[in-house]
Structures are given as C-alpha cells and as structure tokens.
C-alpha cells in the first residue's frame, strides 16, 4: 500500500537528470546561434552597473537571488527559487514535524494567544493553558512582532530551552516558564465520529498523512460497529496539497484497482502512471469527498481519482484547479529549485489545470457577511502567468474557500451526512461503478 515516490525523491532523480543533460542542450543551442550568450552578457553588464552606480551599495546576494526568482516566476506562479532558509522551512513542512513547544496560537491584542496546547508536548507538560497570552519570548516583548516572527522564535533545535512570560486570566502576576523544545509532530489528519458516520479531514499532504489517515480509520472502526457504520466523509476543503506520493497512497486507501493518476512531462517518455493496489481500508463503505475553492493540487488528485473510478461522490463547489507537478531540485548549500516539470491527469485522462474538479453534487456553503469578498478565490485560472489548461474556459476555476468553525453550521458536511444516512437522495450517490470513464 505505501509507496516511496515522494516529490522529494522524484526531485532528486530528475534534478540529476536535468543537470547531466544541460550541457548537451546548451551545446546544441550555441552551435545554432550565440544569442543566449549575448543575453547573458547583457545580464552581466547590468549587474556590474547596478553594483557600481546604484545610489546605495546593493547586496550582491540579494541581487542574484532576485534575478533568479524573476526568471522562475516568469514561467508560472509555482516555479521558484528557495534560499537555504526557505528550503529548510519547506523540508520541515513536508516532514510534518519540527523542533518546538507544541502549541496552536493566534494573534490577539498585540499578544500571542494560545488556542490550545497539543497533548503530550513540552508546552502541555510545562503547564501552558488554552487562553494564555504570551507576552515575552526569551525576554523579548511580543508587542510589535508579527505572528510568524513569534512562531519562528518559539521553534528551534530539539533540546534547546526557551523562556516564556505568560499572562493568564485570574493570575495576580505574569507566569514565567522555562520549556525545553522537543520534536513536534503536526497532525496531518483529524478524525472523529459523527454518530454513525466516520469523519476524516486531511489538512495537508505531508510525510505523515497516510499513516495518520490509517490511524483515523482504525479508531473510527473500533468505535462504531461495522453494521452501524454508514460510511465516511473525506473532507479535503481548504487543503492546499503537498506530496504526490501521499496523494497516491490516500487514494489507494479507498481503492482496489485502477489508475489513480498519471503525470506527463515535456517529452513523451516522461509519462508516469500510478495504479491502485488491492486492499480497501474502509471495506467498501460509501465515501463522500468534500471540496471547495481551497482544495488544490494533491487534494484534487484524490478527489479526481475517487470520482473518476466511481468510488466516491464529490460534493461541494469547484476546486482550485492546480494541475501541475513541481519537482524539488536540491542545490546543495545554495538552497533548492522548485520547478514545474509535469501536469497530472485523472484516470479519465482529464487535466484539471485551470478548471478544477467539478463536484458531482454542487452544494454552496453560505459565507458570513463579514467574510464576503475575502474568502472567494478565482482558482488557478485567476493567477497571473499560470499554465493554461487544455479545457480551461473564461469561467475559470475556484470558489469560496470557507468552512464554518462549528459543524452544526456546516451546510456541506450536513448534506453529506444526510446522504449517507438516507435522509436525502441524489442520482450521483452512490456512484455507479459500471460507468467508469477511462483514459483514452
């Protein structure tokens, strides 16, 4: 079931191939004409003029990084250069763990407010409580900091201590705590039982996603007897994507056979196909997938596979429409290159680039008045310089990226629960497996 085809691994292999093939391509181009070298000479001239004559002495490293970034962002919105710090942050994000304290925080009244300490982490063990305000970090006043800057200060090497000054309601004076950082594993999948239905929400596709999903399914099955369990809701709303191999593994968790996704690159020989393996973790129980304008990339791979193979009914609004694959090419101590190298296609041979996944059952989620205009997204088609999809139209992709904080107010979720319980009916649920559309 578990595949070792992470985007990182693909990046390393393709990166080596790209480097080894670079010279022959360049040699062929230079044999034809010298225009490329003339253009590079212009770049060198401009760089030296800026260094010598700009009103204040510029930072050479920043100039070069900006030039590289400009070259890559001119290709598409997802290709980019990452300096060493950004590359390490990206690796931390995809690993799904980091050195830190274990608290979920927000910014309130110019202070960092603790939403909740994560169970069995250094913060929880030290006595940090939900509702605490962090006023100082290692003696530095939090007022004036951005939330991201404060979070960066609290993260660090495992085993390093940090001092926090907390303001707690009802306490006579600030509380000083010394906490030692430890490895914090970010939960990639949240799960719960909704009466007789299993609810699985995938937050992001990190290295831990499939393992967390498997654990969630097992917990739900242990809590609800098989004869009582009506099915599962797989919530991919607001999921920005992540690792390709994890999207494949998650899709495979609900499938017995069939192609999950194919990726097609610049050359005909660059096509790769990924198939499901026997073993449906939910034993054929009905599945409804929730998507909205915040569902992108890896989450669209899962929705598209389960939809095309008639394993699940997709409910909600049109997804974001990011149908491109980015390869991470390590540059040693100089960071990494994120380069778009392929487009992916659903089992029916459809590219969702610029169009998104169209739900089988369209259900709008009402947006509160105070958020209208702030959570709507034009999707991939609304991004300047995006790669235009083969089926893209002026209608574009994307829809509101909003999920109510209280499940009782969640129109899309409750519609799905009603379908699974038989309180509502729709021709698209359950899907008809005899009508599977295959890649031509």
Image (cartoon, grey):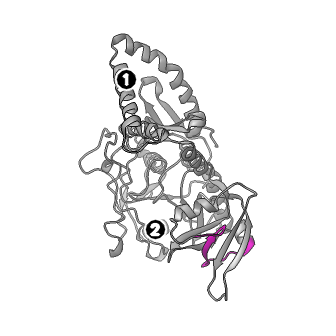
Read off the residue under disc 1: 41
Q: x, y (%) of residue 421?
A: 49, 69
* Tag 1–tag 2 contact (CB < 8 Å): no
The question of residue 134 being in magenta is answered with yes
Element under label 1?
A: helix
Q: Which residue is mark 2?
A: 413
Q: Is residue 391 left or right of residue 268?
A: left
Camera sees residue 54: yes
- Which residue of the protein is positioned furthest toward the left in this rendering? 394
Tell me which corner region of the image, top left, top right, bottom left or bottom right, holds residue 220. Answer: bottom right
Check the picture and name the quadrant holding the C terminus.
top left
Please give the name of the residue rendered at 36% of the width and 33% of the height, measured from the top-left corner: 49
- Identify which residue is drawn at 33% across, 13% down: 33
- Image coordinates of residue 249 in percent, x first then y, are 58, 45
Q: Is residue 186 covered in magenta? A: no
Q: Nearer the viewer, residue 348 or 58?
A: 58
Residue 358: x and y in percent read 35, 52
204, 56: nearer the viewer: 56
Q: Secondary structure at mark 2?
A: helix
Q: Quadrant of the N terminus?
A: top right
Check the image and report above or below for 426 versus 341.
below
The magenta segment:
126-141
**Which circle's residue, 1 or 2, is located before the other in the chain?**
1
| Number of marks in picture | 2
Horizontally, residue 155 falls left or right of residue 320, namely: right
Q: Is residue 346 visible?
A: no
Left or right of residue 418, residue 89 in this image: right
Q: Give how far across and how far down residue 114 sits, in percent.
A: 59, 73
Quarter of the view holding residue 200? bottom right
């Amino acid at each position: 079931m578990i595949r070792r085809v992470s985007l990182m691994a693909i990046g390393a292999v393709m990166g080596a191939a790209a480097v080894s093939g670079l010279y022959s391509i360049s040699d062929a181009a230079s044999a034809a004409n010298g225009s490329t070298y003339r253009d590079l000479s212009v770049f060198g001239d401009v760089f030296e003029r800026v260094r010598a004559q700009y009103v204040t002495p510029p930072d050479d490293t920043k100039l070069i990084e900006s030039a590289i970034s400009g070259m890559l962002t001119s290709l598409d919105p997802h290709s980019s250069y990452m300096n060493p710090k950004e590359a390490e942050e990206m690796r931390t994000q995809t690993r799904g763990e980091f050195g830190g304290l274990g608290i979920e925080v927000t910014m309130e009244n110019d202070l960092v407010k603790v939403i909740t300490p994560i169970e069995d982490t250094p913060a929880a063990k030290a006595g940090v409580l939900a509702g605490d305000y962090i006023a100082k970090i290692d003696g530095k006043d939090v007022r004036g900091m951005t939330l991201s800057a404060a979070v960066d200060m609290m993260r660090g090497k495992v085993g390093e201590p940090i001092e926090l000054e907390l303001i707690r309601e009802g306490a006579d004076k600030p509380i000083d705590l010394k906490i030692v950082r430890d490895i914090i594993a970010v939960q990639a999948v949240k799960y719960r039982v909704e009466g007789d239905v299993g609810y699985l929400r995938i937050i992001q596709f990190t290295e831990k996603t499939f393992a967390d999903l498997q654990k969630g399914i097992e917990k739900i099955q242990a809590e609800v007897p098989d004869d009582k369990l009506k099915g599962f809701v797989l919530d991919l709303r607001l999921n920005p994507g992540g690792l390709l191999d994890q999207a494949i593994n998650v899709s495979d968790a609900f499938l017995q056979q069939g192609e999950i996704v194919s990726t097609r690159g610049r050359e005909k020989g660059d096509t790769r196909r990924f198939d499901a393996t026997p073993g449906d973790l939910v034993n054929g129980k009905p599945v409804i997938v929730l998507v909205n304008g915040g569902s992108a990339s890896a989450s669209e791979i899962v929705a598209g596979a389960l939809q095309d193979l008639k394993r699940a009914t997709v409910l909600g609004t049109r997804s974001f429409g990011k149908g491109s694959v980015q390869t991470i090419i390590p540059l040693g101590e100089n960071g990494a290159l994120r380069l778009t190298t392929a487009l992916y296609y659903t089992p029916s041979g459809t590219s969702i680039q610029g169009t998104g996944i169209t739900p089988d059952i369209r259900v709008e989620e009402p947006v509160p008045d105070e958020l209208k205009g702030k959570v709507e997204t034009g999707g991939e088609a609304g991004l300047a310089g995006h790669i235009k999809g083969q089926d893209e139209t002026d209608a574009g992709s994307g829809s509101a990226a909003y999920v109510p904080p209280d499940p009782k107010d969640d129109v899309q979720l409750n519609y799905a629960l009603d379908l699974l319980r038989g309180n509502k009916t729709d021709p698209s649920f359950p899907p008809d497996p005899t009508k599977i559309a295959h890649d031509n």
